[in-house]
Image (cartoon, rainbow, N blue to C red):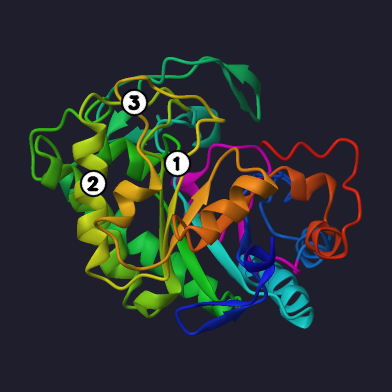
């Protein structure tokens, strides 16, 4: 386990080890979506990991779609997040904010009766969604007009500015798990005929425009992107997934990002449209650091680092039940009985 727990670097950041805390929605911000002292304590308790990636954080009111999840689009939210960044930094930790737009995985109850937006008007065929008014069926979203895209991109840029003002070391752009940018990437959810649809290149356009905008706020080595090539979560999975995600990674490689966060594991389900995409496929086209995620155990994480398959591994739910996970690894202390290292 030595290398997994050894110090490492991520761009110009010195990290305590090769373990990242995966982003996990905790729904503790209240109806106003303002981060609070409870959240600051929660993240500070886990600051012994190499890098904390926060729970998904909405970039605008249009991006909302999860009860009591935090935002980053008002001054009060910026001030609320400062509690967390200050607490994490006081413990010597590093923390990135994950930028989120839910797209069609939302509901009109979150938007004063207005439909959620997506790449195309294609309904999420899945279980019901919890809204402020209770459980509801998903709706057919409204396809974003091309002339709305610049404002959407600008909202990502403003969210990055707010993240910087709140003291975050960097940001991770959420383009995975069936949320808006993922909806533009995949042919299953993107049936557009304009410059944002049709070809693999066009479907990648919005993600690259968002990355370009955020690089006007943070240097590229403080910006990351998350992808889920194998995922079925939120009714995703497209026949041309391998070509799409390989192309996206190739294009992202040119930026010199902090890292590419790949959901390479299958613990959230697999679309079974072909062979599982692995980190080695991304390593072949992406030269900056790779973070693997989803279903890793301590042993498989250590192997991924030892073999060079990944530069870091993101661990999720075990850090909920065991905030001192790193200390226990280091000292050989038994984990809490309910710690499931396969998730």
Between residue 252 and residue 25, name the one nearer to us: 252
Q: Which of label 3 and label 2 is nearer to you?
A: 2
Whether residue 22 is visible here, answered yes or no, is no
Residue drawn at (23%, 24%), measured in percent from left and top? Answer: 239
Residue drawn at (87%, 58%), measured in percent from left and top? Answer: 332
Distance from the alpha carbon under mark 3 to that under mark 2:
15 Å
SS under mark 3: loop
According to the image, label 3 marks what residue?
237
Q: Would you identify the image quadrant in which residue 220 lies?
A: bottom left
Q: Which range of residues does the magenta coloring cover?
A: 47-72
Residue drawn at (54%, 35%), measured in percent from left and top? Answer: 110
In the displayed structure, does residue 110 sit left or right of residue 320?
left
SS under mark 1: loop
Q: Position of residue 249 (x, y in %)?
A: 27, 54
Instruction: From this view, report whether residue 89 is shown above or below residue 196.
Output: below
According to the image, label 1 marks what residue?
264
Is disc 2 surrounded by few (<14), some (14 to 19) or many (20+) residues within 10 Å?
some
Q: Position of residue 270 (x, y in %)?
A: 44, 24
In the displayed structure, does residue 127 sit left or right of residue 272?
right
SS under mark 2: helix
Whether residue 194 is visible here, answered yes or no, is yes
Q: Which mark is residue 246?
A: 2
Q: Would you identify the image quadrant in which residue 224 lies?
A: bottom left
Q: Position of residue 265 (x, y in %)?
A: 50, 37
Distance from the alpha carbon under mark 3 to that under mark 1:
14 Å
Q: Which of label 3 and label 1 is nearer to you?
A: 1
């Amino acid at each position: 386990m030595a290398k997994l727990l050894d110090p490492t670097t991520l761009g110009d950041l010195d990290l305590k080890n090769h373990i990242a805390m995966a982003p996990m929605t905790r729904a503790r911000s209240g109806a106003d979506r303002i981060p609070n002292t409870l959240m600051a304590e929660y993240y500070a308790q886990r600051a012994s990991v190499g890098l904390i990636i926060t729970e998904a954080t909405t970039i605008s009111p249009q991006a909302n779609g999860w009860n009591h999840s935090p935002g980053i689009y008002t001054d009060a939210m910026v001030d609320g997040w400062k509690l967390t960044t200050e607490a994490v930094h006081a413990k010597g930790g590093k923390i990135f904010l994950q930028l989120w737009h839910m797209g069609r995985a939302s509901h009109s109850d979150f938007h004063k009766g207005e439909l959620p937006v997506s790449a195309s008007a294609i309904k999420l065929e899945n279980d019901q969604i919890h809204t402020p008014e209770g459980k509801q069926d998903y709706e057919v979203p409204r396809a974003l007009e091309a002339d709305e895209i610049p404002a959407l991109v600008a909202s990502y840029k403003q969210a990055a500015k707010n993240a910087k003002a709140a003291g975050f070391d960097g940001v991770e752009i959420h383009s995975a798990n069936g949320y808006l940018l993922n909806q533009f990437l995949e042919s299953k959810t993107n049936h557009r005929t304009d410059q944002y649809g049709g070809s693999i290149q066009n479907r990648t356009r919005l993600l690259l425009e968002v990355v370009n905008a955020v690089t006007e706020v943070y240097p590229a080595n403080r910006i990351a992107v998350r992808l889920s090539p194998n995922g079925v979560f939120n009714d995703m999975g497209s026949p041309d997934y391998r070509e799409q995600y390989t192309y996206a990674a190739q294009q992202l490689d040119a930026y010199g990002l902090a890292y590419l966060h790949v959901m390479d594991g299958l613990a959230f389900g697999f679309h079974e449209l072909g062979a599982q995409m692995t980190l080695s496929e991304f390593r072949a086209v992406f030269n900056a650091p790779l973070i693997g995620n989803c279903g890793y155990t301590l042993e498989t994480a250590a192997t991924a680092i030892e073999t060079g398959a990944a530069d870091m591994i993101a661990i999720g739910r075990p850090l909920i039940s065991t905030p001192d996970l790193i200390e226990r690894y280091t000292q050989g202390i038994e984990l809490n009985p309910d710690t499931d290292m396969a998730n």
